Structure formats: structure tokens, C-alpha cells
Image (cartoon, rainbow, N blue to C red):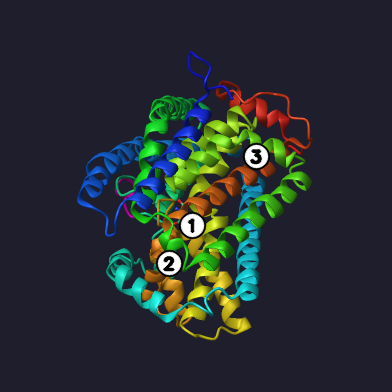
Amino acid sequence: MSETNGRGVSLHTKILIALLAGAAAGVTVNFLTPKPTPAWLDHLITYVMRPLGDIFLRMLFLVVIPLVFASLALGVAQLGRMGNLGRIGAKTFAFFLITMSIAVVIGLGLVNAVEPGVGLPRDTQDFLQKEFGKDAAKKTDKTTTFGVETFVNIVPRNPLAALVNMDMLAVIFFALLIGIGLTRISAERAQPIIATLEGINDLMIVIIGWAMKLAPLGVFALIFSVTARFGFDLLIPLGYYVAVVLIGIAIQMFGVLSILLATLARTNPLEFFQKVRNVIITAFSTSSSSATLPTSIKTAEEELDIPPSIAGFVLPLGATMNMNGTALFEGVTVMFLAQVFGVELSLGDQLIVVVLSVLTAIGAAGVPGGSLPLLAMVLTTVNVPGEGIALILGVDRLLDMCRTTLNVIGDLAAAMFVARSERGGPEVTEPGPREADGAAYGAGGADGA
Ligand code: ASP
């Protein structure tokens, strides 16, 4: 790993130590303190740990809009100039949809086999309902109804408003238009805009470097806040459900994606996972695909040698649309809650769950808990009480950390697949410097236009 400090301790080692130390400290404090959470611990979390964690998160979030916009528009412009945008776009979307569908099917298979919701004790269920009922109502209150509007809203009425409101799908749409448009005007006119976008892109990468310096502290604070409050108490009654989600995530990540990497992308999965350690840690500790995007772009270009034009196209799209972990989580959760509430879901119903899980995973925002409002929508669609979400809220943070990790690994796998298929060979020796961008990678395309 390239990022080391003067004494040779790499950043990822520091982040990993912070992650483990934060978790150990949080669990220990949770174990040693009486329930409910004493005031001093509440204050420590509210006034020290959460703010530290939030500042780190905000440092990452503040680059997201300019970065997504600039890298996507640039990626599209570069691919468009090479005449292969359509092919790359089609490959990217096909990879997204197929892997997300496989993820949900794995989740449903597991949850049907294990049936974690069938034996849940009544009093545990009541306790959790009471404990998290209000919270669930709050989180799902702002539920954006999913329907034809969701698609209409992808086209922003006012692109600046979309940027300001972090309306990711609309921002993506606008960036795609700008990128395609840049290929349709004269090179002379397009050049200054492209140079500006490149400048913005590079600037954001510099700021990310600064944000990552805060990562060890931020990660410690974030993990401590979660574990000190909840410890492992709530994991026990929902243990089987959690296990099903986690096993599903592991199968998708280390099984399905590894096989796809090895076969379609001709990449050694072990090496791949080794190189993306920083991304895994960032996704796991931030629970946010968007916040992880800067790190994944950097890693894709510097560690995986993915051309910036492909990384800049696939990864921002993936951070918002490609959520393997979220789709799997949604499928398992809908079935689990259906089991808890005794709702029979036929094969046809489960097919609807598959489709809706994939669609809502595409629509979910890449932020912590981003899928919860949409999950409530899927639940009600198949007649499972939406408040059922209260049952899983207590463990959601842990699941969110894990599903976000899979979400982001899925994006990198997609980028790797697209990059390798475009270059047409397993040997990737040329580095991915931003300056060399368009022309170099255009020439490297296997089948040209
Ligand atoms: N936290 C997830 C992500 O950012 C979204 C979700 O499933 O809630 O990828």
C-alpha cells in the first residue's frame, strides 16, 4: 500500500487498529456499564465520539457531489469520444443487474432454508417493537414512495437543486448528459470544460487524502459509539437472522464475486481482496457507499490499475445503483419479517420480492440506513407490516456495515470486469495515470469502436 507515514506505518494498518480498538473499547464499556446507558457514557458518545465520527464522515461527504459529477461526466466524455460508451454502459448495467439478482436469490434461498423468524420468542418481539417502534416510524416517515415518480424524478427539473439536495440519481443523469454532450460539441469548446472537470476531480482526490488522515480517529469514534450503546445484547435474539444475512453476504462476496472475478475478469480474487483492504475498511466503518466512493476510485486507479475513464464511469454509478449487499439484505429481511408475522409468501410473492429488492437497492441512497425507507415500501407491498422494521433496527448498523462492504466490493468487481474486458487480456501492466487517460485507454480497447 502506498500510503505510509514517515515511520512506515501504513494508513490502512492504522485504520484497522482503530477499528479493532474502537470495537473492543465499545464492547468492554457496554459490558461493564449498567443498563440503561449511564449519563456519562451518553455524554461521551453524544458530545465526543459521535461528533468526531461525524466530522470524518462529513469530510468524505463533502467531496461526493463534485466528485461524482466531475468523474462521471469525464468518464462518459472520454468513453464517448472513444465510441464505446454504449458497449461499456451495457456491460456495466448487465453486471449490476445480474449480480444483484444473484444476491437476492442467495438471500432468499438461505432465509427459506434456515427460517430464522419462525421461532422468535413473543416477548423478545414485543420488547423490540416497543424499544424501536418510534425510531422506525421516524426513519420510515420520509419514505419516498416507490413508483412511476421514482423514475420521473431521475430527470431533474433543476440540476443545481439536484446537486444541492444530493439527489444522486438526478445528479448522475445530469452528469451523463453533460458527458455525452461534451462529445457532441467541437473539441475546441469541449476542452476547457474537460480541463476544468479534470481539475475538480484532482482537487477532490487531494481533499480525500486529507480526510483519510482523520480516518483512524473517525473510525475509532464511529465504532465505539455503536458498540458502546448496543454491545452484543440485541444481536442475540436476532442471531439467526443476522447470521443468514452475513452468510449470504459472505457467499456473494467470496463465492459469486470471486468466481466472476476469476472467470470474467481473469483476476486472482485473493490478490483483488488484498488490494482493496482500505476500501473494505472504509465501507465497513462508514456504512456508506457514497462516503466510500472517493477511496474506491483511488484504489481502483492506483491499486487495481483500472483506467480512470472506466473507474470514473463505473464506480460513481455503482455507488448509487449497484448494491449487492442491500438487495440481499432486503430480500432476507422481508422474508424474515414475513416469518415473524406469520405471513405466507408464495413463490410468486417471492419473485416480486426479488424484483422489488433489486429495484429498491438501485434506488437506495448510499448513506447509512439508506435502504430502510425503501425496505418499508417493499414490506407493505407484500403485506408484511412495515413497522416490522422496528425488529431489525437494533442490529441494522452491523448489517449496514457488512452490506455496504459488499455493495462497494460489487462496484469494484464490476469496474474490474469492465476494465479487463475492454483491454481484452489478463495482463494489465500499464498504470492508470489520470494524465494518460482518454487516448491511452482508447487505444487499449480490445475491439475499438
Ligand atoms: N448503507 C448502504 C450503502 O451506503 C445503503 C443501505 O443499504 O442502507 O451502501
Task: Compute the Cα span from label 3 to label 1.
Answer: 20 Å
Disc 1 marks a residue whose amino acid type is Leu
Disc 3 marks a residue whose amino acid type is Phe
Asked if the residues shown at circle 1 and circle 2 are in contact, with their CB atoms under 8 angstroms apart, the answer is yes
Q: Where 402 sits versus 107, above or below?
A: above
Asked if the residues shown at circle 3 and circle 2 are in contact, with their CB atoms under 8 angstroms apart, the answer is no
Q: Which residues are magenta?
A: 157-162
Q: Secondary structure at mark 3?
A: helix
Seen from the viewer's position, the closer of residues 194 and 408 is 408
Give x and y (percent) for residue 128.
36, 71
State which tag comes first along the sequence, 3 or 1: 3
Q: Residue at x 48, y 51 (%)?
A: 401
Task: Compute the Cα span from label 1 to label 2.
Answer: 9 Å
- How many marks the image carries: the answer is 3
Q: Where 215 sits versus 236, above or below?
A: above
Q: Residue at x 67, y 38 (%)?
A: 272
